[in-house]
Amino acid sequence: MLTDLIIKNFAIIENLHVTFNSGFNVLTGETGAGKSIIIDAVNLLLGGRARGEIIRTGEEEASVEAIFDLRKDHLVGEKLIAAGLDNDDELLVRRIVARSGKNRVFINGSPVPLTQLRELTGGLVNIYGQHEHQNLQRTETHLKLLDSFAGLQSTLVDYRAAFSSYQQLQRELNQLNLAERERQQRLDMLAFQRQELLNAHLIPGEDEALERERSILQHAEKLITAMVGGYDNLYGGEEAACGKIATVATELESLQEIDPQLGSLAKSLQDHLYGLEDVAAELNKYAETLDFEPQQQQQVEDRLALLSSLKGKYAPTTKELLEYLEQITAELDDLTHIEDRRKQLEEKLQGQYQQLLDLGERLSGQRQQGATELATAVKQELGELAMGGADFAIRFTPLLEPSIDGLESGEFYLAANPGEEAQPLARIASGGELSRIMLALKRSVPTGDGVRTLIFDEVDAGIGGEAATAVGEKISRLGKTLQVLCVTHLPQVAAFADHHYLVAKEEAHGRTATKLSLLNSEARVAEMARMLGGLHVGEKTLIHAHELIESSRAVVAN
């Protein structure tokens, strides 16, 4: 529900903040006061085209801001949460249009692209102008309205689930049915890659081990020299450290009879001596393994070159090379046994198609029944809107292939007068007829498209008398379940409003500005009298205005 609208420097509106209520809100005022400008501002928030000429003369930018209460618009709330724009059941939309062309859009304080604005607000408000009945002119919405009227949501969910499964199987089969030449080329390439990897006899981590081995082989002479030298200095040479340490330990051991504490020093030296002897033995053992052969180094170099080549072609490590080998082996198996897989998919697809047809035919049957009931309801509503001779029907056209919405398309047809041939509703040019048909549909299917705020911009043009009264009553009753904003020149329509707003122009400092104010009871009677009597408003006109409001209230109350 639209609760607040703030407009700044938009056309002749300088600064306007209005709070709207639930129910039926009517906007009236003299011609040129700016009523339709307010509708244009709302349309901008729905993603409408932004033009530089809408900016008030002398200003650099215009802004339109609106607050929506989302407590009953759960779908929009879910979209906000998904987009990270949640704001506790409230939607704040702001759009700024600048002369520089740098236009900006904000949702709950966060900048967003225009496409996201349209997606989020598209399900909040419908604007119906005399030549702008968007939903009625989009035939794709007709089935949606019918399905809502007939309560077919559950059946449609089952059908769409089956349709989704059918599409998935169809995609899998299409992928499988590659051109035979392409399949063979793929087979040849994968077979070559697989054999090349198999011939390499890959071992996980061997590239790292080979790198270490190559480094050792490249420095084998240096390592041998160090190992042999170390062994000689520690143990094997005539002046080896171990021999000298052993001599010192023996001397200290022989002197412990003189000083017992020398025995502990002798033991400590002996313990360290054992450790040094172990190190010397390890050095000698390591040196014996460094039996350098040029042929061995070449083998390591060749192996690393092979691994480097394979890595450059397929994957950066031997582990990933082995994973790629498993992957292409599995794909080769699928391609090799494609006929078996194709046969399985074709059988599943045929079964799924039959299930889809069964559900689609069930949906079609329910739609046929619902169409008859909806047509009856709409014709009854039209009869109360001074179109008693009109004929309304829903016509179905079978589709060549099932679609996400069923086995047929559906379109509303109307013959406005007896004896006329019914025409597609989208082609009807009369704004007055379209407005009444739209009201009849909305009365029959109040929340058919899920939109809970409706804005009527002089959709009652071209009608009067009893038809105008009927339109006012219908809109009023619609306001019992939805929020309705209506711009009108007809007092018969305005009399039914729950809340009456006056749009007026004021001049100050040589500039004209539009103001919008909620009328109290007395001011409302005065405005109704103006609508009834024009410039000459007398006592009788005021009484007539008051009676018209009271009688309208009585009609709705019954």
Image (spheres, rainbow, N blue to C red):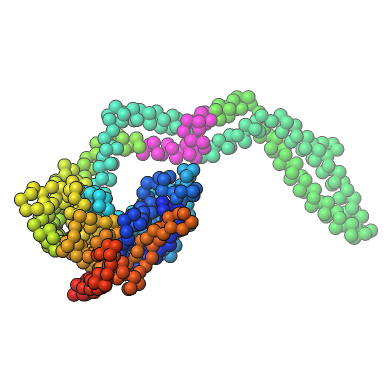
Residue at 6% from the left image edge and 53% from the top image edge: 418
Magenta stretch: includes residue 99: no
What residue do we see at 24% from left, 47% from top?
A: 166
Residue drawn at x 55%, y 35% as measured from the top left:
207
Residue 544's image quarter? bottom left
Relative side of 215 to 249, left or right = left
Q: How many labels does the image show?
A: 0
Between 77 and 447, the one nearer to me in the picture: 447
Q: Residue at x 21, y 52 (%)?
A: 431
Q: In which quarter of the image is the C terminus?
A: bottom left
Main SS, magenta residues: helix
Q: Is residue 244 left or right of residue 57?
A: right
Q: Can residue 442 be seen in this view?
A: yes
* Quadrant in which the N terminus is drawn: bottom left
User: Percent from the top left, x then y, of residue 82?
Assistant: 41, 56
Q: Image quarter for residue 259?
A: bottom right
Please provide the residue range marked out in magenta.
306-330
Q: Please state if 221 lies on the left or on the right of 522 as rendered.
A: right
Q: Is residue 326 magenta?
A: yes
Q: Is residue 242 above or below residue 127?
A: above
